[in-house]
Structure formats: C-alpha cells, structure tokens
Image: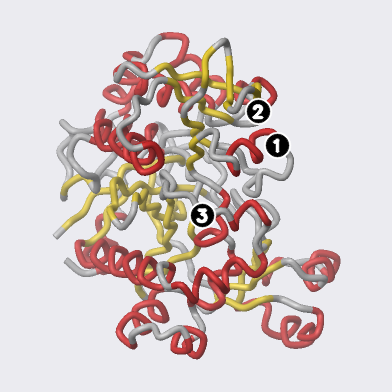
Amino acid sequence: MNFEAVNILNHDWRCGAVDRGALERILHEQGEAWQRLVHERCPHLFAAASLFVSGTEMEQMQEIIRAVQQVVERPAWGEAALEYAPASARYVPRARGVFFGYDFHLNSEGVHLIEINTNSGGALLNALELGSQREVAAPGRPAAVDCLEPAFLSMFRNEWRLERGDAPLGTIAIVDDRPLEQYFYPEFVLVQQLFERAGIVALILDPAELDVRDGGVYAEGRRVDLIYNRMTDFSLQNVPAIRNAYLDNQVVLTPHPHAHARYADKRNLVPLTSPHILRAMGVEETTIATLLAGIPETRLVGIQEQEFWRQQRKQWFFKPATGFGGRGTYRGANMTSRVFAQVMEGGYIAQRMAIPGERSVCLDGVEPVMMKSDVRCYVYGEEIQLVAARLYQGQTTNFRTPGGGFAPVRVVG
C-alpha cells in the first residue's frame, strides 16, 4: 500500500479510533492510584486515534536505522563525534544503551529522520495502550514485536550481561531529577513493576538519594547494580558522584554519555547528510544514498553565514545542538529578530524543513480536526521493538492537545 492509500485512512477519523473504554480498563489494572495520577497529571497522554503507516514506510525507516548504525560503528565516526563531546563520553562501556528513539516525519515526499534520542521515554506507556487495543477492529497490524514486556526486560538483562557477564542482577535504580515531579513519573512506576515482576528490586530515585562509597553505589541499604538513566544531563556534569562511579566501573549505567555523543548530539546530523564527509570515512555509496534520501539536510549555524540564514530561514528548522524534548527549537518562518540573533550566536543546527504527517481526530461532540504526527521507533541495537506516534497541534510535540498524545501505529500492506 502506498502513501496515498494510507493517507486516506489517516484522514478518516472513524477508522482506527482508540477504544477509550478498553484503554481505561487496562489503566485501571495498574492500580486506581496510578490511573488517577495519569488523569490528573497527564490528561492528554494518550491520543484518540491510531496512526496508519504503510509497509513500505516501515521498510524505509528500518533501512535508515541500519544505515545510521553502519556509519556510527566506523572508527572514523567515533573519532569525529567525540571531538566536541564531554570527557565523560570518551569512556566506552560495553553496554549499548536502552530505548534509543529514532523520530521520523512521514509525508508525501517520503520518510524523514528528524533526530535520534538515546533517552526516549514512553515505551512502556505505548506498550500499555497498544495492549488495550488488540481487540479493536482496524486495518493493518500493530507495529511492535510480540511480547513487548519480555523484550524490554531482556534488553536490560543484556545490558547487564555485556558489562558483568553471569553475575546476578539484583537491584536497579530508575534515576531522574525529582522523579515524583516528572511528567513521565507514571512510566517510572511501570518500569519499576516490570523489574519487580522479574524478581529484581527496583527503586525510583533522585540522584541525591544515591550514596557512592566503598567502591559501589548504594540506596536504601542496598548496593545498586544498574542505573536506568532518565536524566537529561547527558554528560553527567551535574551529578559528579554518579559520573565518577560510572567512569570507575562501579555501576552499570544505561543509557550513557558515550551513546548520546555517538548518536544523539544533533551536530551528528551534519556529517550524516554530508556526502563528502561520508565518502572520506569510506561509507558505501548505497548507504550514503539511503542517508541522503532519508535525513533532511542539516548544517551548523554560525554568525559568519548570518545573511544566508536571514534569507533562507523559512526553509529550515533550528534546534539547539544539545537540546531535547523540543525545547529551544524554532521554525525559521516564525522566528523573531531577537530569537534569530540569539540563534546566530551559535550552538544551533539548522535542518531543512520536512513537514510532519497528519491524522484526523474526533472528540465527542466536536468536529474532526487535523493533527500533526511524528513517528518514533524504539530501537535496541538495530531491532525496532515498537513504533508509536505522537499526535499534536503546534510547533512541536507537547502532550497538551485534547485528542493528542501517544498513538498506536498500525502497519497496512
């Protein structure tokens, strides 16, 4: 099935509407307090409709992910990526990093990789929503591997095995700054329950609650074996005790600074869309072609090219090189003079515009509305474990749009 046929499905709000009753039942199964927390803190977490993608689009996303992986594994890439990386990123652990997120815009011009994240939230929330919709009649098939929870658990066990071999994994800390205040705190609870069902002690902690001593990391009287890192301090600059424990191999950390530097620093999109740089690294022409077709052209922004950017800015989207979550991003056409001057000072990349997809959504008693969509592939290694969409209105994904939020993805054809 081609894009036009899938687009027809995505413009029909009645096709693939989320069964809210089924979703609420599975939310309730996680506990009344947890369900209430989701409704109070995250009222627009789950979208009102699934998103349809074609089998061809799925294959193209997989090809782009493979192409990126082939380049990133080259020694020359590591040397280039680490030139502007913090010192903590130069330590190379064996662990790969869990829950990589490859974010795409799908439109009539093709499949476009917008960015790569190494600390992508939402996988377990999406798995929960997907599981609630299995009995809903809709075209296509779920875009996920079978038995998602065992796959997620196996991923963490493999991270531990890569670092510690056959040693028992006893305690995991899920760590973020002020976790109780985080928007995705409900997901932290799901992760905790996943580990506990497997017989692993799981603690949700602020970095300050970890005690680094006696050659290890401790919390609540237990030695922490592995930290599931949800912090957005990707270099660990503001948590020196954790950084030092990680660099001294006293604790397994995933995801880690090296993975962020190698994959998720947005400056990496510049060489990934520069054929002369890729050829100098010895990348095959077929891989280069896949990358150039699948990633919008990306450039570093600098004051020396100010006049070029002033004239061409409407065709570009500007992002902070080390940003996350859509913060500090600007569509060139909407930039004020003050913002333009700030961006020109440096620290930004510019990516050629690739418009997001669209999905028609209808809420009770309201006329259908069109929402933007982007698609996230949750990846471990080269394997796509789960594909989910985010529906929204506005410049970037925001989880503030009624009827928007995480949406199941179904592959048609």
How does the figure colour the protein chain or chains? secondary structure
At a point 57% along the width and 39% down the height, the residue shown is 400
Numbered disc in front, either 2 or 3: 3
Q: How many callouts does the rendering have?
A: 3
Disc 1 target residue: 239
- Whole-percent x, y for residue 9 in the image: 25, 55
Q: Quadrant of the N terminus?
A: bottom left
Alpha carbon separation for disc pair 1 and 3: 19 Å
Which dot marks residue 92? 3
- Mark 1 residue type: Val
| Label 2 element class | helix
Disc 2 target residue: 207
> Above or below — where is 214 with respect to 109?
above
Circles 2 and 3: CB atoms closer than 8 Å: no
- Whole-percent x, y for residue 270 in the image: 56, 76
At a point 48% along the width and 45% down the height, the residue shown is 120
Circles 2 and 1: CB atoms closer than 8 Å: yes
At a point 22% along the width and 61% down the height, the residue shown is 54
Alpha carbon separation for disc pair 2 and 3: 22 Å
> Above or below — where is 186 with respect to 146?
above
